[in-house]
Amino acid sequence: MKMLRYFFYLLIAVALLSLAAMNSQAVTLHYYWGEWVLPLSLFIFFVLCLGCFLGLLLSLGPLLKLRKERSQWRRQAKNAEKP
């Protein structure tokens, strides 16, 4: 079963590498202080990583709030059990 999983990962990696090789055209990103020329597949990878990072960052606030609330509930439950 482990070998099948590794084969599946290898298949996905080969498919993504071939997609990156087919989309190797240069893309120019213009911003306020200059421009940046990079391959399309690399640009898509950077945007995907930026989106994942921002999603994790935005979910951090509610996660910390829930952890704080959970610790308060545990403290209340522990105090309620004491005679």
Image (cartoon, rainbow, N blue to C red):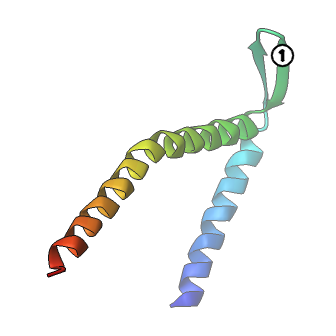
Q: Is residue 50 left or right of residue 57?
A: right
Q: Which x, y percent locates residue 5?
A: 55, 80
Q: Nearer the viewer, residue 65 or 43?
A: 65
Residue at coordinates 61% horizontally, 79% vertically from top-left?
Answer: 7
* Quadrant where the C terminus is found in the figure: bottom left
Quarter of the image for residue 33 reads: top right
Q: Residue at x 72, y 40 (%)?
A: 41
- How would you rate the neighbour count of disc 1 (Cα within 10 Å): few for under 14, some for 14-19, many for 20 or more? few
**SS under mark 1:** strand
Mark 1 highlights which residue? 35
Answer above or below: position of 66 versus 44: below
Q: Nearer the viewer, residue 46 or 5?
A: 46
In this rendering, position of residue 42 left or right of residue 59: right
Q: Between 32 and 62, which is closer to the camera in this rendering?
A: 62
Q: Quadrant of residue 81?
A: bottom left
Residue 45 at x, y percent in the picture: 68, 42
- How many numbered marks are there? 1
